[in-house]
Image (tube, rainbow, N blue to C red):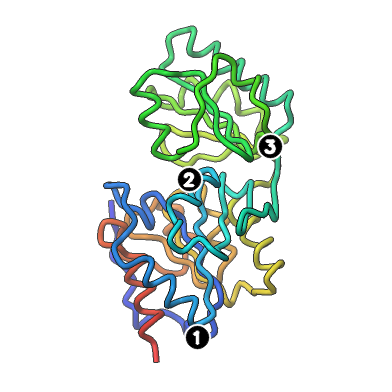
């Protein structure tokens, strides 16, 4: 359920901004999966004012590079829920999952699938993503987020450094969580949607990656705007003084954010960006 957006007259002073970081799905990107019209022009206009735009997503780096190709030069990309920070093809920050943990989780998902649970696992690496499920229904679902997807007989044979083990279940996560929750003691367990759960390195989140980007660029939280909608955006909300939950966001994200932007279906992020650009 959406809530009433904040009146723009209540926004704090947005002068002196240097960085905008936004989640994609159900934040910047609506249900149709398309980026909003006019986004490239807005990103270029922000750059002219010295403000960088950084997508912050659970998607893989190559997907973000494809999505933002017209404006990707010089753009920082926060990928895999913050496990990777890349700019112009250079990996600035990466947190990998240990091979034994990857092997154990893949084994758990294989067991669940063998028992009849409609579930699949993906390994998101620094170069590509990998899965063993080849059925059209599953591949169509995951390819939406992971464009460079390789279907393999055994994903443990992939020659790549894994930064995220992603589990998607058409049956929901009730059968999955009891089998993996113990990894929460040593790793990050991240929910990116009702049917998606990710296991990643310890302290991996979008907020930590954004803080690393701020450190590299010498940008403070006071100079940063962030947008999000779901639980994997929680730490992102804390990394920028000007934090916006879209009106369709999870209640916990709305509670954590300083402001509420219009919903993703109303292109709320674009409305706030236009407000920033028309100030003064």
Q: Which residue is drawn at 45% across and 20% down?
A: 119
- Separation of residues labelled 1 and 3 (CA atoms): 38 Å
Which residue has dot 1 on it? 15
Helix, strand or loop at disc 1?
loop
Q: Considering only order in the chain, which callout, 3 or 2, is on the residue closer to the N terminus?
A: 2
- Separation of residues labelled 2 and 3 (CA atoms): 24 Å
Q: Considering only order in the chain, which callout, 2 or 1, is on the residue closer to the N terminus?
A: 1
Q: Residue at x 47, y 7 (%)?
A: 115
The spot of residue 13 in percent (x, y) is 47, 85
Which residue has dot 2 on it? 63
Q: Is residue 253 above or below residue 240?
A: above
Cβ–Cβ below 8 Å for labels 1 and 2?
Answer: no
Which residue has dot 3 on it? 187
Q: In this view, does 44 lie above or below 263?
A: below
Q: Residue at x 68, y 28 (%)?
A: 159
Number of numbered discs present? 3
Q: Is residue 34 above or below residue 258?
A: above
Q: Mark 1 vs mark 2: give the one in front.
A: 2
Helix, strand or loop at disc 3?
loop
- Separation of residues labelled 1 and 2 (CA atoms): 32 Å
Q: In this view, does 185 lie to the left or right of 17?
A: right
Q: Considering only order in the chain, which callout, 3 or 1, is on the residue closer to the N terminus?
A: 1
Q: Which residue is drawn at 43% across and 25% down?
A: 169
The spot of residue 4 in percent (x, y) is 28, 65
Cβ–Cβ below 8 Å for labels 1 and 3?
Answer: no
């Amino acid at each position: 359920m959406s809530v009433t957006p904040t009146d723009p007259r209540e926004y704090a002073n947005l002068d002196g901004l240097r960085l905008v970081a936004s989640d994609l799905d159900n934040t910047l990107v609506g249900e149709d999966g398309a980026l909003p019209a006019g986004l490239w022009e807005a990103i270029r206009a922000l750059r002219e004012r010295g403000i960088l735009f950084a997508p912050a997503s659970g998607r893989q780096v190559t997907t973000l590079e494809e999505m933002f190709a017209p404006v990707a030069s010089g753009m920082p990309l926060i990928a895999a829920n913050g496990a990777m920070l890349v700019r112009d093809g250079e990996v600035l920050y990466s947190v990998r999952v240990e091979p034994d943990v990857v092997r154990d989780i893949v084994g758990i998902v294989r067991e669940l699938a063998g028992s009849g649970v409609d579930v699949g696992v993906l390994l998101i690496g620094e170069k590509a993503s990998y899965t063993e499920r080849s059925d059209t229904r599953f591949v169509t679902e995951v390819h939406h987020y992971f464009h460079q997807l390789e279907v393999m007989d055994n994903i443990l044979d992939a020659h790549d450094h894994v930064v995220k083990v992603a589990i998607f279940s058409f049956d929901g996560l009730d059968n999955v969580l009891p089998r993996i929750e113990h990894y929460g003691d040593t790793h990050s367990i991240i929910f990116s949607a009702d049917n998606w759960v990710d296991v990643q390195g310890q302290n991996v989140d979008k907020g930590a990656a954004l803080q690393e980007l701020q450190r590299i660029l010498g940008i403070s939280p006071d100079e940063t705007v962030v947008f999000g909608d779901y639980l994997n955006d929680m730490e992102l909300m804390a990394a920028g003084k000007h934090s916006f939950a879209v009106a369709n966001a999870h209640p916990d994200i709305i509670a954590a954010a300083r402001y509420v932007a219009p919903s993703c279906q109303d292109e709320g992020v674009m409305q706030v960006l236009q407000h920033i650009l028309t100030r003064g």
